Amino acid sequence: MRLSQMLFVTLREDPAEAEIPSHKLLVRAGYIRRIGSGVYAYLPLMWRVLQKVSQIVREEMNATGAQECLLPQVQPSELWKESGRWDTYTKAEGIMFALKDRRDRELALGPTHEEVITTIAKEMIRSYQQLPLHLYQIQTKFRDEIRPRFGLMRGREFIMKDGYSFHTDEESLKQTYNDMDRAYRNMLRRCGLEFVAVEADSGAIGGSGSQEFMVLADAGEDEVLYTGDGKYAANVEKATSVPPDAIPSSFTSYEKRETPDTATIATVCDFLKCDPTQVVKNVLYQVVYDNGMTVLVLVSIRGDRDVNDVKLQNELTKLAGEFGGKAILALTVPDAEAQEKWAAKPLPLGYIAPNLEDDYIIKTDKQVHAKFVRLADRTVVDLKHFVTGANESGYHVVGANWGEQFQLPKIVADLRKAEKGDRAVHDPTQTLESARGIEVGHIFQLGSKYSEAMGATYTDENGNDLPLMMGCYGVGVSRLAQAAVEQSYDKDGIIWPVAIAPYHVVIVVPNVSDSKQMEVAQQLYKELNAVGIETLLDDRNERAGVKFKDADLVGIPYRVVTGRAIKSGKVELVERATHESGEVPLDGVVSLLQEKIDRALEK
Ligand code: ATP
Ligand code: MG
């Protein structure tokens, strides 16, 4: 491609909308343009990158026996009502774009495709002989994200590879899951990315397991906790750890104490001269289930630790049935306005004890459960002579014990946020370290959640109808492409890994009015393209300095300059990543580039 004929506009200044380097660079170098919040145009250079990423993904998927298809983006609401996700996706998270057609029928723009694929499986899979089966697609997804940002990292319209597999049993599912683990590692390695695979939260589906692939970068929205021995890495949402040991309490007898202005752990510890590990903190939450039921929740946790909202949400989802619901619409710490809706009298906030009386909740509203659901994190179970609130503003109790002044809640679970510096579970001599990560892929053993909800069954060898076992596997193609930039740039611009660069080589003609320079460049351009080296020709009537700056910004791996050296039958070859340059005889440049590119592409 000749730059003089391309829509090629680079910007000197960082765009105001962009916060992180990769976003700035992709806009400045003319790869993407913002059209609306979280909505971007992929310009020709970007589209080439995305196609290359897609092709690598496709090759690795096909190698596992998965088959490509293309599913509809417009999805009838009935499917989502069948699976029970219509309300959570349109109301709770509100992440799904829903619309009505001219006949007033509800539709949605696909944020993901479990419902569509399960419907197909339900209709088309009859027998165990058709299994296992794995279908995937590469397609634009729509999600009305609360906070679209960072360009392609969190868009409202983005490209995803999503695959769904069907199995007779868990063993077969595990096998495909492991194949996907390998395929994903291959994809990311081939795309030139450094990444870690981490244990991930699998929501309330639980048990079966899920793994995310994280590109480590400061701009990442996820936190990863890992150990130096390489044996443990997990998303903080899922991570577990051994908490620091509690310091034994010095309060030997039970007493109520006046503790004015001590509504926080820090202030009460300061006032009572005790350690946060001696305090039972009671955190109030409000959960709204999908049937509209509001339930108030008290979580008792050690004073020095924080509740992990994802773990709490999973635990509360397990309880949904008790309140007539299936899923959670919202889990929040109720503010003053929310409290007004259900509080029968002012709450002793900051001084709550595990036995806060149920009569703080009004009894007149059928949509509000009249009792607190009480949960305890494991950190409080073994505490002795602890400090906690006295259910009265300005007062605490000290020297309390479970089974004496307070009942340990029946539900005890790991609800604690693991933190950097905690000891690792697999080896307490290892401590957890923290890093930021960009989630580029997620593989997931779904089990029979969707097949059971939607009645997708198969007939086994003995004629029994059984629900299909399912797995699902996603790669954020457009996010991955930008993550590559976030991981590889310098002060001059983007440094694309060869495998996903829009072009391999850019030939820069310093002076287009020098006919010799142009002639050599055009000849080389022809030869390179003829052997399959994707080449750009910068034949614009611009100063050499401008062209070099643009070439660096755009980040093409190799630059060939037809400058002064052509007099001695040579061209200058510059590697973008290292800025290393040298003169190469004209007749050797094609084979040299071919060699370098093949090596980079692992051919
Ligand atoms: P996140 O936690 O980042 O919101 P998710 O868990 O909702 O992602 P999945 O449903 O697992 O994402 O989607 C599969 C992949 O699609 C993710 O691993 C990610 O790479 C990509 N992805 C998800 N949401 C977006 C988005 N808004 N913009 C770009 N890529 C996205
Ligand atoms: Mg995910």
Image (cartoon, rainbow, N blue to C red):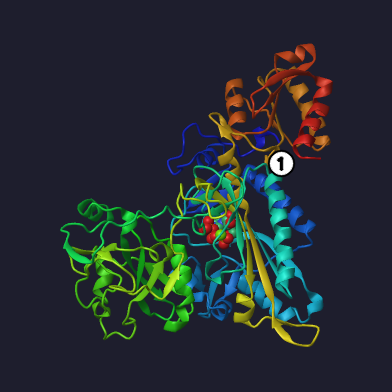
Q: Quadrant of the N terminus?
A: top right
Q: For this view, does 394 lie left or right of residue 58?
A: left
Q: Residue at 63% of width from left, 64% of height from top?
A: 444
Q: For this view, does 499 lie left or right of residue 368?
A: right
- Give the mark count: 1
Q: Quadrant of ligand 1?
A: bottom right
Q: Quadrant of residue 376?
A: bottom left
Q: Quadrant of the C terminus?
A: top right
Residue 436 position (above or below residue 508)? below
- Mark 1 lies on a secondary structure that is helix
Mark 1, ligand 1, within 8 Å: the answer is: no
Q: Residue at 53% of width from left, 80% of height from top?
A: 103
Label 1 neighbourhood size at 10 Å, few (<14), some (14-19), many (20+)?
A: many
Residue that sits furthest to the front in the current view: 252
Q: For this view, does 2 lie left or right of residue 530?
A: left
* Residue for badge 1: 499
In this orientation, which residue lies closer to the viewer: 274 or 208? Answer: 274
Q: Residue at 44% of width from left, 78% of height from top?
A: 290
Expressed as whole percent of the image width and height from the top left, the position of residue 375 reads: 39, 71
Q: Amino acid at mark 1?
A: Ala
Expressed as whole percent of the image width and height from the top left, the position of residue 92 reads: 44, 70
Q: Can residue 394 be seen in the rendering of this structure?
A: no
In this orientation, which residue lies closer to the viewer: 263 or 511? Answer: 263
Q: Quadrant of residue 5?
A: top right
In this orientation, which residue lies closer to the viewer: 185 or 562? Answer: 185
Residue that sits furthest to the bottom in the current view: 463
Expressed as whole percent of the image width and height from the top left, the position of residue 447 reads: 64, 72
Q: Can residue 256 be seen in the rendering of this structure?
A: yes
Residue 326 position (above or below residue 164)? below
Residue 19 position (above or below residue 252)? above
